[in-house]
Image (cartoon, grey):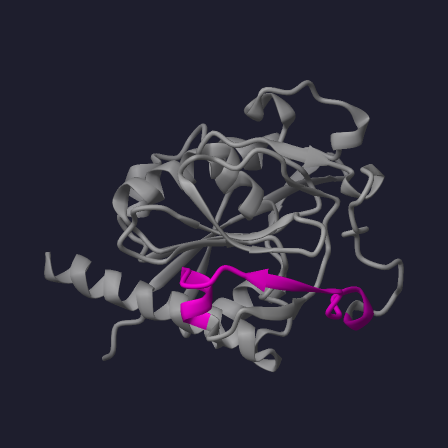
Amino acid sequence: MTYQPLVGLPADTYENNGFTFHSIGDKYVRAVAEAALCLPVMIPALAEVMALDALLDHFDGIVITGAPSNVHPPHYGEQPSAAHEPYDHARDATTLRLIEKVLARGMPLFCICRGFQELNVVLGGTLETELQESEGRLDHRAPTHPDVDVRYAPAHVINIRPGGALERILGKRETMVNSIHRQGIKRLAKGLAVEATAPDGIIEAVSVRDVKSFAIGTQWHPEFKALNNPDSVKLFTAFGEAVRAYARGRRAA
């Protein structure tokens, strides 16, 4: 029987009728299963009761997803305000520690939207909220529309750094991406390299410096209908290949 590597995806939390629920959007687990060809497994946001190192012993890669919530500002040295809401403290407690441990292991890591911002925070960077209120910025929020295809439609071009990891994966120096965020990177962490920017200068993709495996973050959402987008297929294929290589090395050890 062929071994299929496991990819963990940390969950968001939300309250309903007095109960806490852990959840992941279908588009993320489907992209891992269908485009990366790996087995997706939800990691609950229970950092206070989970031994994260023991948990990671079972995984071959991690995807840090997007979410409706934002990273709590004290994690990057700012005061919380209504402009930064909503928050998900249980997710913060899990993902921020998890990212650090994944990088230390050299495990493949793919960070998307909120995950992209979390990666920057973990490595010492900061975030800027309500980008659309700053002079010279594009409105990076999704259009208000009931049709998800409209909300996730290509919104603007990104310029891809020549010779970088993203250019090697996509084979081009610009492409169109969707835009579903109101927060972005303010100060880039020293451990990250810029892979792509929007026309207004907002960082749209990063890679982790000095790593041997796949460690990339995107501000846009490549997971949305991934199989219908050639760029998304290339990204998740590259991630899946890195996951399988990590799994082979882990099993051999």
Q: Residue furthest right?
A: 145
Image side of residue 131 versus residue 240, left or right: right
Query: Residue drawn at (43%, 43%), measured in percent from left and top?
Result: 192
- Of residue 64 and residue 189, the one placed in the foreground of this image is 189
Image location (x, y in percent) of residue 98: 41, 39
Image location (x, y in percent) of residue 9: 48, 53
Image side of residue 79 versus residue 1, left or right: right
Image location (x, y in percent) of residue 122: 46, 33
For residue 225, above or below residue 54 = below
Write down the quadrant of residue 135 in the picture. top right
Image location (x, y in percent) of residue 20: 65, 38
Write down the quadrant of residue 108 in the picture. bottom left
Write down the quadrant of residue 128 in the picture. top right
- Does residue 236 show up? no
- Of residue 180 and residue 165, the one placed in the foreground of this image is 165
Residue numbers of the magenta segment: 149-169
Query: Residue drawn at (10%, 56%), measured in percent from left and top?
Result: 253
- Does residue 116 show up? yes
Image side of residue 159 versus residue 79, left or right: left
155 is within the stretch colored magenta: yes
Query: Residue drawn at (57%, 42%), measured in percent from left and top?
Result: 117
219 is within the stretch colored magenta: no
Query: Residue drawn at (42%, 73%), measured in percent from left and top?
Result: 237
